[in-house]
Image (tube, grey):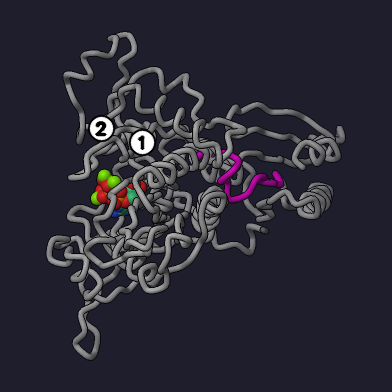
Amino acid sequence: MRLSRAFLPVLKESPSDAQIVSHKLMLQAGLIRQTSAGIYAWLPLGHRVLQKVEQIVREEQDRIGQEMLMPTIQPADLWKESGRYEAYGPEMLRIEDRHGREMLYGPTNEDMITALFRDDVKSYRDLPRMLYHIQWKFRDEVRPRFGVMRGREFLMKDAYSFDLDEEGAKKSYYRQLLAYLRTFRRMGIKAVPMQADSGPIGGKLSHEFLVLAPTGESEVFYDAAFDEMDLEREGLSYEDDAGLEALFEEVTSHYAATDETHDEARWDAVASADQRTGRGIEVGHIFYFGPKYSEAMGLKVSGKDGDMVTPMMGSYGVGVSRLVGAIIEASHDDNGIIWPEAVAPWKVGLVTMRADDAATVAAAEDLYAKLDAAGAETLYDDRDERGGVKLGGMDLMGLPWQVIIGPRGLKNGVVEVKNRRTGEREELTPEAALAKLT
Ligand code: ATP
Ligand code: MG
Ligand code: MG
Ligand code: MG
């Protein structure tokens, strides 16, 4: 992408109406613009990151489930059937269509997926199943704030599992646990699984995933064991039931909770040298709720012996748009964003220090074409702007690598390659720079 043709509006000043660093940086670097309270347009830079985050979530979900797409607008009848239309309260945006039918903008999809599954599934042979979609949700939050962290309209991945019995449902839960740990790790962030409230069902099958950041809305308490734990379990197969259960046992054997479920007595049992406290951002939540929706909505299948069986369900959410903010909270400095490579909008920022120097422009055009041909995603700042302004913009936008081309270096046959995270700079020939970045 050539910056001279791009819509990448960077603000000179840090916006004063944003309270936390990720919100400030997302506005300043031109990732998002607010269109109503808690509702945002994703500009090209933000949209690229959102898509990368979404794609990582998708790839990890595809290993254990199937993608589909449910609508944003739902009929109220579905929610009346499951019995939670009234209970959901003012967070639900209720709509009436021209015929006076009650509709709503979906805050989540348990009711709809249960109805869809019920209408097509008849036998135990159709279980287990794991289905997911990545779709916009609407929750009319009392206090939308912190930009995309607590929006009213936000992008969520939500998955739903259907199993014949609780044993099966546990396996589905363990698979999602591992998928989540791998998903967040791939994005370059650390998310600690914390015991969450499991409602009337009880048990331990409810975890929230918290990214540690001082601006997080939750207070967190966890055992230092999580810093050492091999959460990713490279090589562990989703078919390895024993290995998955061992992961779950390890995760649940150490204390980790948010203020919502914090238990002073259990906390006191953690050695004080191992007590870690701080703040965190909820980026995901996995939850087993058994027959809650299947029972209410009449989802039944015939079992092996002919009896009718009510499937056990769980749901698994990831805050895809919230993650973009959370990643920035966890990865930035005074100069701007520092994208982990896996979610960076472009890998390389190519900058000419002098757009009026023919040799500089020729070298930059040549390298740009070669980077592009080799598949290295590159944002090329070809504008006639001062070098310092361009470099400041690149730091702000946080691309992992900068290639800086100017007349002085070219005289010696070199360009400068800078790593955004470490600040390390290297002088390389254009060929060596190309080899390094591709
Ligand atoms: P919170 O406690 O932050 O209100 P939640 O527990 O209500 O979140 P869930 O119902 O568990 O949210 O939804 C799954 C995921 O969706 C959350 O873990 C979070 O990452 C994301 N999410 C929920 N509400 C919002 C929101 N208003 N804006 C952005 N992301 C959200
Ligand atoms: Mg909420
Ligand atoms: Mg929550
Ligand atoms: Mg939650």
Which residue in the structure is indicated by mark 2? 258
Please name whichever residue, 364 or 237, is drawn nearer the observer in this view of the structure: 237
N-terminal of the pair, mark 2 or mark 1, is 1
**Segment colored magenta:** 336-353
* Residue 100 within the segment the image draws in magenta: no
SS state under label 1 = strand
Task: Give left or right: position of 48 versus 40.
Answer: right
Q: Is residue 255 visible?
A: yes
Q: Position of residue 282 (x, y in %)?
A: 33, 41
Q: Residues within 10 Å of mark 1 (few under 14, many from 20)?
A: many
The amino acid sitting under disc 2 is Thr
User: As shown in the figure, which amino acid type bears the numbered disc 1?
Assistant: Leu
Dots 2 and 1: beta carbons under 8 Å?
Answer: yes
Percent of width and height locating residue 173: 40, 43
Give me the residue at 46% from left, 57% from top: 129
Tell me the distance, in whole angstroms, between the alpha carbons under discs 2 and 1.
9 Å
The numbered dot on residue 210 is 1
Some atom of ligand 3 lies within 8 Å of the CB belonging to the residue at label 2:
yes
Does residue 160 lie above or below 281 as drawn? below
Query: For mark 2, does the 10 Å Cα neighbourhood hold few (<14), some (14 to 19), or many (20 or more) residues?
Result: many
